[in-house]
Image (cartoon, rainbow, N blue to C red):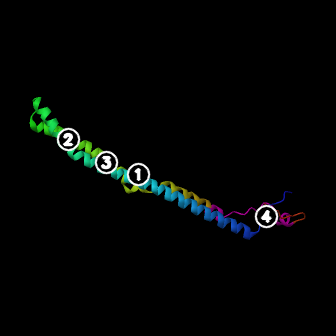
Amino acid sequence: MTSMNLRPIPEIFTDLIGQLTSLVRKEGQLARSEISEKLNRALAGMALILAGAVLLIPALVILLQAAMAAMMESGMSPALAALITGGAALVLGILLALVGWSWIKPASLVPDKTIDQLQRDAAVARHAASPTPSYDEPLAQETGHGHQRNRAA
């Protein structure tokens, strides 16, 4: 018969509280870290949008004028030259704005890793809170001759 390592209830309860406190602290650190990372990404996205807007306005004016002048010199009508250059500038501006917007939309700011870890922790806690006792060994064996209480040091 193997001896069982039994610990007093207060010691188990103290360990449980200590581990729960440590878990909550670590989850808080993870959440802060992930939120900080998401906010930095959002700020970079806003900076890209701003940089794109600041650079697009004067660049568009200059490039549109130069492109239209070049196309008109090659024999293109002024209306078609304006349409081609304006369309190209519009596409470039939309692409920059969409990339920046994708970095700051609310769905990209959710701390997914932390939420996933908290869900896993909750599942483990639910599993640990509802232990299924094993009744394979009769009670007489647990309280029988030679039973010693061993504590881990």
Q: Secondary structure at mark 4?
A: loop
Quadrant of image for the C terminus: bottom right
For disc 1, the neighbor class at 10 Å (few under 14, some 14 to 19, many from 20) is some
Residue type at numbered disc 2: Gly
Q: Which residue is mark 3?
A: 98
Report the Cα–Cα distance between label 1 and label 2: 30 Å
Type of amino acid under label 1: Arg
For the record, the magenta segment spans 125-143
Residue 6 badge? 4
> For the residue marked with disc 4, what is the amino acid?
Leu
**Label 3 close to label 1 by CB (< 8 Å):** no
Q: SS class of the residue under badge 1?
A: helix
Q: Are marks 4 and 3 in contact (CB under 8 Å)?
A: no
> Vertically, is 92 above or below 42?
above
Mark 3 or 1: the one toward you? 1
The image quadrant of residue 38 is bottom left
